[in-house]
Amino acid sequence: MPVVSRSNYTAPLLCSNPHVQTIIPTVFRKVRGVSYQRERIATPDGDFIDLDWAGVGSKRLAILLHGLEGDSGRPYMMGMVRALNRNDWDALAINFRGCSGEPNLKLRMYHSGETEDLHTVICHVAASGMYDELALVGFSLGGNAILKYLGEQGDRKSPLIKQAVTISVPCDLKACSVRLEEFRNRPYLRRFLRMLHEKIRVKALMMPESISDIGYERIRTLKDFDDRYTAPMHGFKDADDYYEKASCRQFLPTISIPTLLINATDDPFLSASCFPVEEAKSSINLFLEIPEHGGHVGFIAFNNDGEYWSETRAIVFLNTMVS
């Protein structure tokens, strides 16, 4: 499929800076008009996942996955949910393990390549018989998980899943972890490590025989964190093994449904390897759109609807592209 390098997104005046695009929506955006109903479902390994539903009585459902240390209440999640509801889509926001306001029961939590829990939720929804059509929408880490899942499943995926949209996706996890170590990105890195520390601290109180946060202050990079925690907690040899196996780029050629990947050229988190141009050119299903601006999960727009460009773009794609 053609690569959409000339996207129609135009950053508003004074919003072309990638850090403005990345920070302003997180700190200042307020999304009103979204009401969730929570459901807790059991996982096959004896844990739980908290799901937040926002329904309008549709037979179409979009399943949303958030980014690193996000949750269903983040403005980018609620903005997309509101746009979906306005356009006759029910929405289901998944909170990854430990991200719903309550620690999960097992040592494992979540990571960029975690697709088992997504599959559990899809099977749960399919078994309900409530929907004729499913779509997947993911942001950053959640986008990586969706692309990896669709590539893993290939033609074996549920026939209910018709299309997908992913935004600001770190397709190459190792390169992105290095990118976050750059001087201009250190405030983001410190914030992520601070938030992750709180989860590890809680886990250490729950399971002192299995995990500890002693010496956490020596962790200075995501690779340090992934070497000490993510890899051993989730069955990887080390951070490099995790990055290699969990990065979605290698799974893109086997995606079997129309899938939109939106990555901004100026995204401060993404490396050059996160723009899979050749894979998109060779695929009948992968649509790669590369706006010049947008930062990381930004794409700010000012309008009467309060809708960001990425939300409008996602709705257009979901409503027009059916496998």
Image: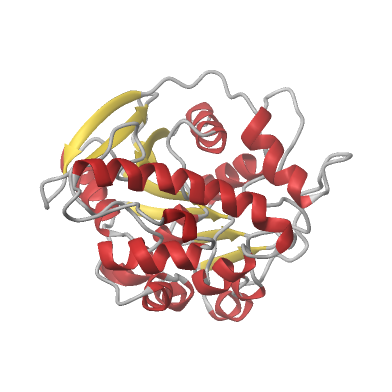
Residue 138: x %, y % from top left: 47, 50
At a point 77% along the width and 54% down the height, the residue shown is 293
The quadrant of the image that shows the C terminus is: bottom left
Q: Number of callouts in the render?
A: 0
Look at the image and tell me whether residue 14 can be seen.
yes
At a point 53% along the width and 63% down the height, the residue shown is 221
Q: In this view, which residue lies farthest toward the front?
A: 215
Residue 261: x %, y % from top left: 57, 60
Q: Is residue 129 left or right of residue 216?
A: left
Residue 110: x %, y % from top left: 33, 53
- To which quarter of the image does residue 281 belong? bottom right
Q: How is the image coloured?
A: secondary structure
Residue 29: x %, y % from top left: 65, 28
Q: Is residue 116 above or below residue 11?
A: below
In this view of the protein, which residue sits in the foreground, 221 or 97?
221
In this view of the protein, which residue sits in the foreground, 159 or 26?
26
In this view of the protein, which residue sits in the foreground, 198 or 81?
198
Q: Is residue 97 left or right of residue 298?
A: left
At a point 60% along the width and 81% down the height, the residue shown is 278
Q: Is residue 122 above or below residue 270?
A: above
Look at the image and tell me whether residue 267 can be seen.
no
The quadrant of the image that shows the N terminus is: bottom right
- To which quarter of the image does residue 182 belong? bottom right
At a point 35% along the width and 62% down the height, the residue shown is 230
Q: Is residue 256 above or below residue 129?
A: below
